[in-house]
Amino acid sequence: MRILFPINIDRWTNPIATLLREIAVPNTDLTFYAFSRPVSREDRRQGQQFWSHRHIRRATPPDLLRRFDIVQHASATPANVTTARLVRWHSRPACRQIYTANVQPHRADRYYTWYARAVLQADVLVAVSRVVADDLQTIFGRRVHAIIPNGVDTAFFDRQVAPHLTMPRLAFVRPMRCLWACYVSANAPIW
C-alpha cells in the first residue's frame, strides 16, 4: 500500500510532521512518500536516520504521477491541497484522501476556503470531539460519521479508575532573580 504525506516531513519542530513521522516509522508493511526540505542542522541530522528506513521514501515530482492508495494531509495550504488533488485524481478511483485539520476554521482564516473544500469533498468526516462535530455541522452543514478523541486515553482520566491523589499545595519558588511557579493539581477539588 502506498501512502503520500504531502508535507516536508523532515522538519523536527513541526508538530504535524512529527505526528506523521510517528505514524510512518513503525508501519514497515506500508510504503510512505513525503517531501524533504530540511531547514536546520537538526532537521538534516535527524533526517538521515528517518530517511534510512526502507519503507519511507522522499517524494519527487515524478512520484506524484504514481498511483497511491491514501493521501493523508494535515494542513490546508494551497500546495498541500493541490498536491493531494493531483495525486487523488491520478490514482482514481481507488485512492482515499484523509484530511485532518488541527484548527477550528473561521471565515477570517486565510485558509478557510481550503478547509471548506476539504470538508465538503470528504467521503467521511471524523471529529476529535462533540464540539468539533457540532461546528462542522453548523459551519459546513456536514454530519460527522464518528468522534475519535485525539490521542486521549479517557480511562486514564476516569475518577473511578484513577488513584485518589491529595495534593493541596500551590508552591512558588524564587531561585536567583527568576520567579518560578509550580502548579500542582488533583483529581478532585482540593478545598
Image: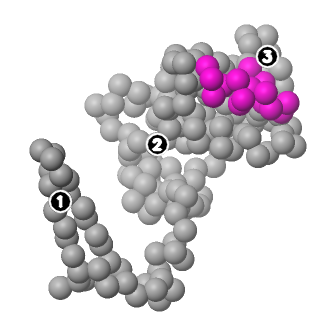
Which residue has dot 1 on it? 173
Instruction: Tell me residue 118's x, y (percent).
Output: 54, 35
Marks 1, 3: nearer the viewer: 1
Residue 78 place in picture, x, y as percent:
51, 20
**Residue drawn 41% across the image and 42% down it:** 103
Give the number of the disc on residue 63.
Answer: 3
Quadrant in the picture for the N terminus? top right
SS at circle 3: helix
Left or right: 125 with respect to 28?
left
Crowding at label 2, few (<14), some or many (≥20) Cα neighbours within 10 Å? few
Instruction: Residue at 52% x, 63% y: name it.
Output: 152
N-term mark: 2 or 3? 3
Label 1 amino acid?
Val
Question: Toward the viewer: 38 or 108?
Answer: 38
Q: Disc 2 and disc 3: Cα gap in Å?
A: 27 Å
Is 51 magenta? The answer is: yes
Which badge, 1 or 3, is on the more N-terminal residue? 3
Q: Residue at x 50, y 50 (%)?
A: 142
**Residue 94 x %, y %:** 82, 36
Find disc 2 in the rendering and name its residue. Answer: 102
Few, some or many residues within 10 Å of mark 3 (<14, 14–19, 20+):
some
User: Looking at the image, how many numbered discs can be counted on the residues?
Assistant: 3
